[in-house]
Image (cartoon, rainbow, N blue to C red):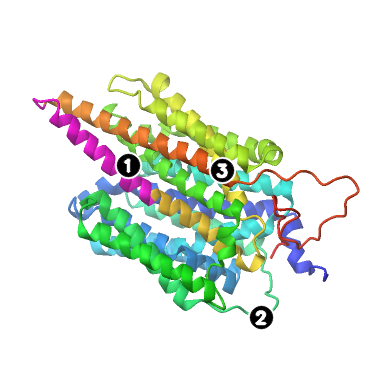
Amino acid sequence: MTSPSPAAVTPAHSSRRWLTLATVALAQLMVVLDATVVNIALPAAQADLQFSDGDRQWIITAYSLAFGSLLLLGGRISDLIGRKRAFIIGLIGFALASALGGMADSFGLLVFARALQGAFGALLAPTALAVLTTTFTDPKERGRAFGVFGAIAGAGGAVGLLLGGVLTEQFSWRWNLYINDVIAVIAVIGALVFVANVARTGPRPKLDIPGTILVSAALFALVFGFSHAETDGWGAFITWGMLAASAILLVAFVLWQRRASHPLLPLSIVLDRNRGAAYSSVLIAGAGMFGIFLFVTYYLQTTLGYSPIQTGVSFLPMIGMLILTAQLSTNIFLPRLGPKVMVPFGMIVAATGMVLLTFLDSSSSYAANVMPPLMILGVGMGSIMPASIQTATLGVDRHFAGVASAMVNTSQQVGGSIGTALLNTLAATAATDFVASHAPVTQQVLSDAAVHSYSTAYWWGAAFFAFGAVVSALLFRRKARPAAAGAPAAAPAASSTSDDAPEPVIAH
């Protein structure tokens, strides 16, 4: 077997790899928090630019549509043009789009800027994870790195709520977009200095154009359909029409990938049992997470009367527990127990936290009734996300690290879209039914109806996590047994040493 080239090995053993992690973590934080930081700024932006309540959803939807539909393409582009180049292009493009949005003097320009943010985010997010995947190949160091990355993926939404509140109250809603430029400048400098530029070896692969069109259209229809389900209802033609179109396009994409000479997403990546379980876990956790951020935010602001800053600060205990658990999980528990134990455990813990949230009412206090469930949810997410993300990218051929990483982001994005639409619809229905059964309608009845609707969403969120516990327990393989003493060492480039545990590939 040919020895790996020095260029291929250098990133994994470079003394600068932890600074590479810091750079990647900044980029990931920028993308993740942008999904929620703008939510806090919406009322102020609406008052400034004078757009209607019906139009305001497009500030969120424009980003999610572009981001969700282009993720796999973005991941494959990073495979084709190189990680460092794609990473820097993604950072600069995201920063320019954010600056354009911050300067927007009309609703149309703001929506265009948000869509542009989503497009560059679809290049940046999977590239950041691919850089991490190919930089850290030592199992112990890989665990620490993915612990940080998983914590950011899980906590970024809550950080966005806190940051959005501070920027909106103390400065202007426009700074919720300008802040990305500050982060991007630091990240670009870090990328230029610390991210390795590895020359490609072997023939240059081609982009699967038919596959790209099919999957991008399918993901666009999927996110668009669920977004309209949230606003127009499940009975609307555009809702179920787009979801049906998405299903047809996804089937066509799978059929094409089976015969394409240069597939966009080799089916072996998602059909691997452990990776399939990891992608499913990220999707389910993504759906459940929106029940945390969306409805707890509404509860704190509308029921308890918290300001945006107070609401953001209220999530800090959850973030702290998530970061602590992520580090303990990846450095201590995951190497010993494997994802088959850690992910179902996290799902059960998260389900428990969601159930505890159902006991909230209009007289509940934050310290006694809200903070403990949030901390429990932090423990759950800290167990789920790092283990799932690390497993999802382990053992992937280096030439497909970008698209495999994109599947992680796609799973989380699709899960978030599904969760938002389903939970919001269920909560709205519960509120309507509550008001109808508690005549005459008073302000107290309306307040109780809102709390009841949040409780309904929490119960369904708990059901999502419980379902995730069953799925992950069944799908993840058991942790591989240690090799017997004296057994020959596995070849470095082997995709697995057993049916149970794939080895990391040589850094690319």
Left or right: 270, with 292 as reference point: right
Left or right: 34, with 450 as reference point: right
Q: Amino acid at mark 2?
A: Pro
Determine the residue positioned at 39% across, 42% down.
Answer: 290
Q: Position of residue 279 (x, y in %)?
A: 52, 52
Residue at numbered disc 1 = 423
- Helix, strand or loop at label 2? It is loop
Question: Looking at the image, which is closer to me, 162 or 233?
Answer: 233
Gap between marks 2 and 1 measured at Cα: 47 Å
Q: Are marks 2 and 1 in contact (CB under 8 Å)?
A: no
The answer to which of marks 2 and 3 sits earlier in the sequence is 2
The answer to which of marks 1 and 3 sits earlier in the sequence is 1
**How many numbered marks are there?**
3
Gap between marks 1 and 3 measured at Cα: 26 Å
Query: Where, by quadrant of the figure, is residue 114 drawn?
Result: bottom left
Residue mark closest to the camera, 2 vs 3: 3
Q: Amino acid at mark 1?
A: Leu
